[in-house]
Image (spheres, rainbow, N blue to C red):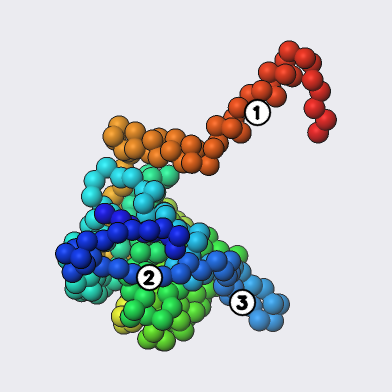
Amino acid sequence: MVESITVDSLIIIDDGLLSEINIHIYRLNSYSPEQLKIQIDPSVHDVVVASTQWELPCKEFDDLWESLVFNDEIKNEVFSTKNTNFMDILWVIFHIFDNDLKVSGPPGMGKTSLCKALAQKLSIHLNDRYKKCLFVEINSHSLFSKWFSESGKLVQKMFDQIEEMAEIDRFLVIVLIDEIESLCMSRSEILNKNEPTDSLRVVNAVLTQIDRIRMFRNVFIFTTSNIRQSLDMAFIDRTDICRFIGQPTAEAIYSILASCIFEMQRVKFYLFYFICSFISLCIKIFQWKILI
């Protein structure tokens, strides 16, 4: 199966297979991501960078989907093109299930990359329905203010920005909240640990804003978590597609290493390694001196 080809590539397709193939033509955006800021206190002009926005499909996320290797069929579960009517599958996976996807697992397992790659795929397959796709990655840690009771207001202002984007029906808005446990920690755990009540207000604000944003059919919400046990049960109940990504198996590790070797061969990385090894050898034998 051919995932993607460049404009310079040539592919020959049998006429009998045309009825079974979905072809999507798209152009990658090369724009730099935009930082969305929120003003905390207008009187002192205090602002924070609450999120980063990309316009998809973009070059930064190109080939990210193909580079991901997991133990199970998680990629086929969250995104499937086996049915010729992709929109029916998308409706079943996301719209009926309130547009929420949560991926949990240990750090460094590819949770964030999977969400970004899935957003890229959705922007390509839905480019005939939506004029523009906006991908917003929320910076969870910046939503906590040093001022008491201000964190909940920051969360509300952040979702107000998302709602402004979603009000345009022809815009597809995909929101990624990385490390959601920093915003949706279990409220019973907060009370037991005598945490500041501002943390409690943040959880309540996030749950309220998620319920509000669900009214928009053109908004998808992706979240990742490193510590699933610390999440508030009310948030977990609002999540309909929840997958765990664990440590890779030996077969997955082999595939990852093989792809790295193929990529180094493609970019001729071995020439760089040979030059560095040659210089290192000359330093040892001929006592070369390198001025830095």
Total labels: the figure holds: 3
Q: Nearer the viewer, residue 8 or 127?
A: 8
- Does the image show residue 224? no
Residue 182 at x, y percent in the picture: 45, 58
Quadrant of the drawing holding the C terminus: top right
Say which label, 2 or 3, has the lower sequence index.
Answer: 2
Q: Nearer the viewer, mark 2 or mark 3?
A: 2
Q: Nearer the viewer, residue 97 or 17?
A: 17
* Image spot of residue 39 (x, y percent): 61, 77
Percent coordinates x, y for residue 279 in the rendering? 70, 24
Comes first in the chain, label 3 or label 1: 3
Say if mark 1 contacts mark 2, CB within 8 Å: no
Kindly indicate the quadrant of the structure image that contains residue 274: top right
Q: What element carries label 2?
A: loop
Counting residues from the start of the chain, the first of labels 1 and 2 encountered is 2
Circle 1 sits on which residue?
Answer: 276
- Between the residue at mark 1 and the residue at mark 2, the CA separation in whole angstroms equals 42 Å
Residue at horizontal 52 percent and vertical 73 percent from the top: 154
Q: How crowded is mark 1: few (under 14 residues within 10 Å), some or many (20 or more)?
A: few
Q: In this view, does 119 lie above or below 262?
A: below
- Disc number for residue 187: none
Give the labeled residue for mark 2.
25
- For label 3, the SS is strand
Q: On the picture, is 230 further left or further right than 39? A: left
* Residue identifier under label 3: 39
> Closer to the camera: disc 3 or disc 1?
1
Mark 1: secondary structure: helix
Give the left or right position of residue 56, taking residue 232 as reference. Answer: right
Residue type at mark 2?
Ile
